Amino acid sequence: MKFAVIVFPGSNCDIDMYHAIKDEIGEEVEYVWHDADNLENYDGILLPGGFSYGDYLRSGAIARFSNVMKEVVKAAEQGKPVLGVCNGFQVLLETGLLPGAMRRNDSLKFICKTVPLRVENNETMFTNGYEKNDVIQIPIAHGEGNYFCDEETMITLRENNQIVFTYTDENPNGSVENIAGITNKAGNVLGMMPHPERAMDTLLGSEDGKKLFQSIVKHWREKHVVNA
């Protein structure tokens, strides 16, 4: 499986994402600059964390207009897995690939620590390697991770089982319903504030993020073996 790590001016977790794919799960991966106009050669798209375009206006607001985002939208419409982590999640919200919006943390402070997450839905292409209600340890590092949506959107998220991860012991940023990660209705676009690419090895405190990337690869291989 071949992944694209999208790099915006201001991305700073692209190297972590690249390392997670290449060195930890052994799949093919390439950096793709924000002005790229074709993602057809990639099977999965990864939008990393950081401060795209300096987070001017608001997080992800400028990145959504990057040339490559037209191709990310096209890839999502084709059913390819698209993962946005932290700033990548914010970009997906701004682009409209995911519903809702992101606000400043309740504390108005940047938060950087490892937090426990509950796997609310293990039937997605991103979570098939977990068990439902698994509690996993994943780092967060953000100043605008307070997910918000209106009640109508929340009803839709619940009905379609789009809430994939929630915070357990505490709600570090004030997100509505403790939400840490959601998918689109089709289930092939995941946005999450915690960083699974930073939880790939026990040496760094946790390898609970590894199953997320392995789940994507497993889904892709099963799909292509069936269709071969």
Image (spheres, rainbow, N blue to C red):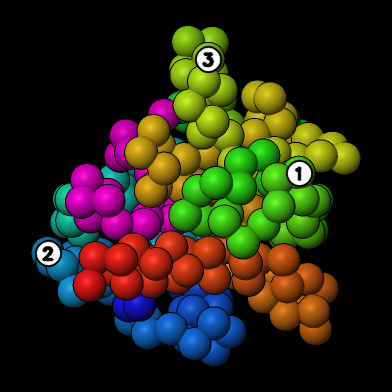
Task: Identify the secondary structure beneath mark 1.
Answer: loop
Q: Which mark is residue 155?
A: 3
Which quarter of the image is occupied by the C terminus?
Answer: bottom left
Q: Are marks 1 and 2 in contact (CB under 8 Å)?
A: no
| Front: mark 3 or 2 | 3
Which of marks 2 and 3 precedes in the sequence?
Answer: 2
The stretch of residues the image draws in magenta is 75-99
- The CA span between labels 1 and 3 is 21 Å
Q: Residue at x 47, y 54 (%)?
A: 125
| Front: mark 1 or 3 | 1
Q: Circle 2 sits on which residue?
A: 37
From the viewer's side, name the closer residue of 69 and 53: 69
Could you tell whether 200 is left or right of 86 in the image?
Answer: right
Q: Circle 1 sits on which residue?
A: 133
Mark 2 belongs to which amino acid?
Asp
Q: Residue furthest right?
A: 169
The percent position of residue 5, horizontal first and vertical second, equals 37, 71
| Front: mark 1 or 2 | 1
